[in-house]
Image (cartoon, grey):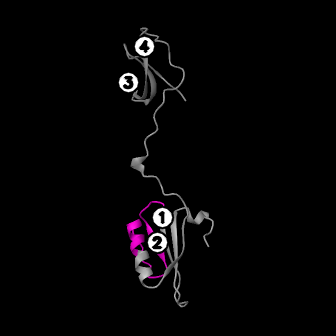
Amino acid sequence: MPTTPTPDDAHVQHQWILTHPDTDRDDVHIELWTDDYTVRVTGGDGEDSEEGRPAVEALLTKYQSAGYRVAHDYPVNDPAPEPENTPEPELAEPDGRPDACPECGSPVEYEPTYTHPDTWGEGPAWLCTGCRWGRWITA
């Protein structure tokens, strides 16, 4: 019967438990980790893999052809998100925009990654569209 995930299985995405009718054979546990490519096998031949779901499918086929059956098959945790598919959060303009530049009266714009030319400091700032006066935004 599937068990409730414990802190020890936070890295496991899906688990398969295979049994054999010959009671002399141990169960085989196959785990697909949340990174979506690490596969760990406990029991059987213990053949771990870094090939993800294709490796799981090959292992299931191998053990089922050797007489094992899938006794339990259940998700444990959601897979980890792909870093390249996770967009960077947008750098939203904060409240407090000055009405105009205090030096020349021109409009100002928000720059989330402004690098000050004199101090080499970097961070969000309001910049004048005319004279480029800058006011750092403090958190």
Give the distance between the C-alpha atoms of the residues marked 4 and 1, in whole angstroms.
53 Å
Identity of the residue drawn at 49% across and 13% down: 99
Kindly identify which residue carries mark 3.
Answer: 118
Give the distance between the C-alpha atoms of the residues marked 3 and 2, in whole angstroms.
55 Å
Kindly identify which residue carries mark 1.
Answer: 33
Earlier sequence position, callout 3 versus callout 2: 2
Q: How many marks?
A: 4
Identity of the residue drawn at 39% across and 70% down: 55
Please identify the quadrant where the N terminus is shown: bottom right
The amino acid pointed to by label 2 is Arg
Give the distance between the C-alpha atoms of the residues marked 4 and 2, in whole angstroms.
60 Å
Q: Nearer the viewer, mark 4 or mark 2?
A: 2
Q: Nearer the viewer, mark 4 or mark 3?
A: 4
Kindly identify which residue carries mark 2.
Answer: 40
Q: What residue span does the magenta drawing correspond to?
A: 33-58
Earlier sequence position, callout 4 versus callout 2: 2
